[in-house]
Image (cartoon, rainbow, N blue to C red):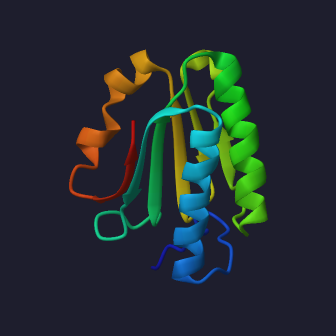
Amino acid sequence: MTTTFPPRAKRALLEPEQIAAAARRAVDVASDKQASDILLLDVREVASFTDYMIIMSAVTPRQTNALAGDLTVAGKASGLLLHHREGTANSGWMLLDFGDVIVHIFDEEQREHYQLEQLWKAAKTVVRMQ
């Protein structure tokens, strides 16, 4: 008996270079909104569920919400489809899942706790902005 699972995320029909450009655009938006310690990882060789992961820090819940809103708009403009959003600004961790690109917005405490950079250390670093 074969079990069929639904696709994890409805993905946009973008070429690899368009996905990479969308991820870089998200980094630019995060930088414009004063996110700190922005990291863009190419996880295609180490993860089967996404192509790029972006990790960043925000100082306040208000900044987290602003980042999430602007990144959602930028993703849509780049052709990415927002599959789901998890967390809240007050929880210290918000996740935006665009299928091909996953964005993590942390406060400093939660970022230190989860240490995603360590978890994905085998991934290729594309951009690192302090």
Tell me: 30 left or right of 121: right
Tell me: 84 left or right of 56: right
Residue placed furthest toward the bottom? 15
Question: Hey, which quadrant is residue 82 in on the image?
Answer: bottom right
Quadrant, the N terminus:
bottom left
Q: Residue 101: percent from the left, percent from the top? A: 54, 59
The answer to whether residue 88 shows anywhere in this view is no
Please name the residue shown 48% across and 36% down the image: 56
Tell me: 3 left or right of 37: right
Task: Please name whichever residue, 81 or 126, is drawn nearer the observer in this view of the structure.
Answer: 126
Vertically, is 81 above or below 111? below
The answer to whether residue 35 shows anywhere in this view is yes
Q: Residue 39: percent from the left, percent from the top? A: 40, 46
Vertically, is 97 above or below 114? below
Please name the residue shown 55% across and 50% down the image: 27
Task: Please name whichever residue, 129 or 3, is drawn nearer the observer in this view of the structure.
Answer: 129
Q: Residue 6: percent from the left, percent from the top? A: 61, 68
Question: Hey, which quadrant is residue 94 in on the image?
Answer: top right
Please name the residue shown 78% across and 51% down the image: 73
Quadrant, the C terminus:
top left
Q: Residue 31: percent from the left, percent from the top? A: 57, 41
